[in-house]
Amino acid sequence: MIRHPLVFTDLDGTLLDHFTYSFEAAQPVLDYLDEKQVPVIANTSKTSAELIHIRKEINNTCPFIVENGAAVYLPKKRFVDCPEGCVDDGALWRYEMSRPRHHWLELLQQLKPRFHSLFTSFSCLTNEQLVKLTGLTSEQAERAAQREFGEPVLWHGNREDKHIFIQAVNELGGNVLQGGRFLHIGDKVNKGAAMQWLKQLYSKLYPESEFQSIALGDSQNDVDMLEQADHAVVIASPTHTAPELVRQSNLIHSKAYGPEGWTEALIQLLEIPAQALLKREK
């Protein structure tokens, strides 16, 4: 039995439906975890602007991790004292693990002559183009464009060219993560390192609790988080094959997609009684 779980979750294709971005299927479990004071920590490629809005929608007041591990945000209401290495960001503390976005825009500019027709930077897309590519509303697309630490690119070339592009980014000191729709260019950070930093912070603040991390994700950029967590859940996707993991223990593959699979796995892992969810489904 997992007595002190920390739930680290990807959003698109995991907690949120890949096509509709709905979390309705997960709402009963979200409510149950909130009642039991189990932290549900978004660990995503999304921006802080997106997360602040999404957290309000799902009634979540927990810490969150943005842009594939580039930064961790801690609500001051839950973390009263500023943790070591954090900076003040209004109602939040922010712990940065990456160089800022303008660094990566300059790097991509260096690669433009060589790969000019093979990728389009997020910053070059209009709001209308983002809406069409992602299925987001205009307001959601505006929040998605507010990158702070990295730069997603839309890839137009073939696999061989993509491999050469990734190698070129690496040679310039960058890193490339494959997301559900975009390649994410940024520092050599990842969701797993950010997850481990936050888990260690919880352990320092609550030394009497033996926290266990549960990571849920569906894409290649979730691999580091899934490999390093105490328990890993690979969520089935209707659009791509499951990421391959080295680990074999404490590993679950959901049968259902997105939030349905998210719910299915957490009910199993946390042994949530059906009766506890019935009243929330009415």
Image: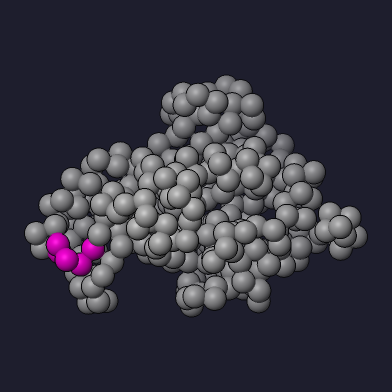
* Residue 118 located within the stretch drawn in magenta: yes
> Relative to residue 48, is residue 40 drawn left or right?
right
Look at the image and tell me whether residue 163 can be seen: no
Give the residue drawn at x 72%, y 67%. Answer: 264
Q: In this view, does 6 lie above or below 63?
A: below
Give the residues in magenta.
115-119
Residue at (54%, 39%) from the top-left corner? 52
Q: Can residue 241 be seen?
A: yes
Could you tell me which quadrant the N terminus lies in?
Answer: bottom right
Using the rendered view, name the quadrant where residue 106 is placed: top left
Q: Position of residue 150 (x, y in %)?
A: 33, 47
Residue 115 at x, y percent in the picture:
15, 64
Q: Quadrant of the C terminus?
A: bottom right
The residue at the point 64 percent across, 37 percent down is 61
The image shows residue 87 at horizontal and vertical percentages of: 44, 26
Q: Nearer the viewer, residue 65 or 204?
A: 65
- Residue for point 86% across, 63% down: 274
Residue 101's quadrant in the figure?
Answer: top left
Taking 189 as reference, is 91 above or below it?
above
Front residue of this view, candidates 76 and 257 = 257
Please tell me whether the stretch drawn in magenta is mainly helix, strand or loop: loop
Q: Where is residue 250 in the image (x, y as percent from the top left)?
A: 64, 67
| Above or below, comparing residue 145 to residue 1 in the picture | above
